[in-house]
Image (cartoon, grey):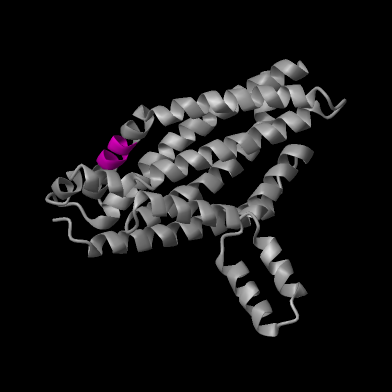
Amino acid sequence: MGLTDVGKIYAIALNTFRETVRDKIIYSLVVFIVIVTLIAILMGSLSVGQNARILRDMGLAAISFVGGIIAIFAGTNLVFKEIDKRTIYIIFTKPITGWQFILGKYLGLASCLLILVAAMGLFLTGVLSASQGSPFQEQIGIMSLPLAVVYLELLFVIALATFFSTFASPVMSVLFTLSLWLIGHFGDSLKELGKMSQNEALSTFMNFVYWLLPDLASLTRIRTLISSTNHSYDEALSYLTCYVIAYVLILLVVASVVTEQREFS
């Protein structure tokens, strides 16, 4: 990748970032996360000695949910918006390849989600610090790694939404991405269902589907363990990071190939 490639990717990423930031849905969802966090405080206060844990867990879950919704709805419109406004035909009259276009779009949305997750995380950290009377810096140390796990999951969701946006309508892309995102959190249930089945063929199929689908449940488990026990779990986290990155790269490569095959010039 040369400097010219980097410049093209940066220009596309910057334009995508600006478009996403201007979208009013982000601001409405930020208000939503504030409300959810305040509700978590009220619920946490009902459990003596557990309010910090409940607030932390609910806050992280809400950030993951809100970030995922933004990633899905913004990501599934990445290519469609360009086609609908016919700007994609102008883009591909220039010396820009499919992989540069897809990577630029992905990085632009990923940058926007990074800032959004950081902002929501700082808000949640401030609420935790105020409610517990603990130093803000201490809470940042506790929250930084769980927030990184949340963002890691969102990187996968963005890649999934980007992939579907290259060949499906926004409605179908949302359905596909949302379905796989939810199923990824219940993969263990498919595996257990296969073990319980008396049919060997069905059991084999369930195991195949389990290994094929993304294991997002593990990300949730490790996030909960880190935030609850304040341990790093370096080995498991390193494995999951490589696992997600591999999925993201595969999805982006396939999305780039699909984009190259379409006639936009």
Residue furthest to the front in view is 171
Q: Is residue 67 above or below residue 28?
A: below
In the rendering, at what x and y percent does residue 77 appear?
A: 35, 45
The image shows residue 260 at horizontal and vertical percentages of: 24, 62
Identify whether 1 is placed above or below 113.
below
Rendered residue at 16%/51% (across/down): 92
Image position of 90 with respect to 143: above or below: below
Name the one closer to the observer, 135 or 197.
Answer: 197
Residue occupying the far bottom of the picture: 200
The extreme right residue here reads 48
Q: Is residue 81 magenta?
A: no
Q: Is residue 28 left or right of residue 170?
A: right
- Can I make out residue 104 in this image? no
Residue visible at 62% across and 68% down in the picture = 210
Question: Is 15 contained in the magenta span?
Answer: yes
Instruction: Give the prevailing secondary structure in the magenta stretch.
Output: helix
Observer-nearest of 129 and 161? 161
* Quarter-of-image position of residue 128: top right
Residue in the picture at 71% in, 82% down: 199
- Percent from the top left, x then y, of residue 216? 61, 54
Compared with residue 152, is residue 180 higher up or lower down, i.e. above or below? below
In this rendered view, identify the residue nearer to me: 192 or 100: 192
Segment tinted magenta in the rendering: 10-16
> Whole-percent x and y of residue 214?
57, 60
Camera-nearest residue between 262 and 32: 32
